[in-house]
Image (spheres, rainbow, N blue to C red):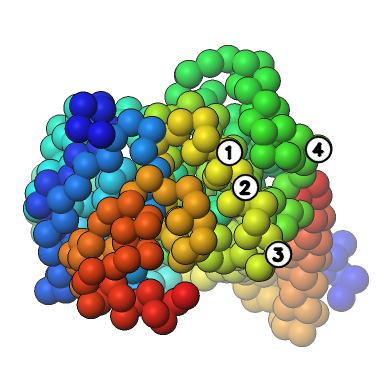
Amino acid sequence: MLTIITVYGSMLLVAMGRTLLLALLGLFFACIIGMLFGIMGVVKNRVSNVISQIFVDVIRGVPMIVLAFFVYFGIPYLFNTIIGGFSVSMTALQAGTICLALNCGAYMAEIIRAGIQSVDKGQTEAARSLGLTYGQSMRKVVLPQAIKTMIPTFINQFIITLKDTSILSVIGFPELVNTAKNVQANTFMSFQTWAIVGVMYLIVITILSRSAKVLERGLNVGR
Amino acid sequence: MADKEIKISVKNLKKCYGDLEVLKDISTDVTKGEVVCVIGPSGSGKSTFLRCLNRLETVTAGSIVVDGNDITDKHININKVRENIGMVFQHFNLFNNLNILDNLTLAPVQLKKCSKAEAEERAKKMLAKVGLEDKATSFPSQLSGGQKQRVAIARALCMEPDIMLFDEPTSALDPEMVGEVLQVMKDLAADGMTMVIVTHEMGFAREVADRVIFMDGGYIVEEGTPSEVLLNPKEPRTIDFLNKVL
């Protein structure tokens, strides 16, 4: 166990850094996608509701490992070989970010849609009856209440997404799991390697969820 | 009454939800300063009628003209019209994320009717009017039902509307809190506010209303002064209803 830490420790830490980078990039774009499709799911427009629902259903209906292969291998093949005349290529980080953003984005869209719809519609009616526009009622009355109910679910989703980065080892991005595979192959110390990797995930996720709890409590103060 | 300014004019109003005809053919006028109480059994369409008056429900057919604006016209700026029509709901619908003062100032400030300072000054005046000046920094969850409803009335008044709509304002209240809300509404009526009130409070209707409308099955069955409708009803359905509630 000590050999792995002394010889490969810094390598694993760097890999953990890449895992966090990938998760952060993915979450950043997932937030944008989630907000976009979440709002599209609640506005009074059949077309945008249906588009939002299809997006969510498709992404949720496909395992992320399939999505990863599809984005990383399938999309360039489509443009370069089937259609032809393109030379699309992407790095594993780019493909990984796209996958996480789409996957987590779909779940965030559902969280946002459900959060907004959980706010009593009397709140909107009261705001509208005073002459506020739909947008003003949303911004000033509905969203502040919806976000409060969304926060615990968001945190949960963030943690799931952080763990899901490990799936992207299959397209060769050198995040923690992929790197650990190499360590195992070099040392043959399976038990030690995976125990260390497990503890590393555990520490990071525990720190994140604890600080999220503190944040959550902070937001509830004064209410 | 005939030469008084007409604030709301409803003609052949019809409202359907799918196949269900809730309002079949409603026509009536409300003049300036008039207090109209709408009574009737549940499911008679009274609340739907009220909600059509500020287009919280879209109208299926007919016209509603408020202060010269036909609000059934898709091109009209409904938000501008609504600024002039206050509404009070059965379940208060105070903004749970805002304290009482912010509940009152949100709309005036957002709609740029006045500065934040002016809005707060007026909000405090309105809170004093409903007897709750000490609750400015409380949150809705800290108030009783009666207090919430008085705040809701004050919130609507902060927009300085010409017309106030009340949708069963005392139906969700404990009995001992009904009086405080009705008192605020009486004061408002005495100040000359044009009011349309859906209510089950017959005593209040008799005392305050200029006109009582009895609705049933999507029609106005009978209307007239409180003594005509409540004390000497002519229609069998009105008599039947009043026998059950009085």
* Mark earlier in primary sequence (3, 4): 4
Picture layout, residue B176 above or below residue B212: below
Which residue bears the numbered disc 1?
B187
Split into 4 quadrants, where in the image is the N terminus of chain B?
Answer: top left
* Mark earlier in primary sequence (3, 1): 3
Q: Secondary structure at mark 4?
A: helix
Distance from Cα at disc 3 to Cα at disc 1: 19 Å
Q: Secondary structure at mark 3?
A: helix
| Nearer to me, A10 or B241 | B241
Dot 4 falls on which chain? B
Dot 2 falls on which chain? B
When asked about the image quadrant of residue B92, the answer is bottom right
Q: Amino acid at mark 4?
A: Asp
Q: Is residue A121 visible in this depiction of the protein?
A: no
Question: Of the numbered discs in the image, which one, if any, rests on residue B151?
Answer: none
* Mark earlier in primary sequence (4, 1): 4
Which residue bears the numbered disc 2?
B183
Q: Amino acid at mark 3?
A: Glu
When asked about the image quadrant of residue B128, the answer is top right
Which residue bears the numbered disc 3?
B176
Distance from Cα at disc 2 to Cα at disc 1: 6 Å
Which residue bears the numbered disc 4?
B134
Same chain for the residues under marks 4 and 1 in the image: yes
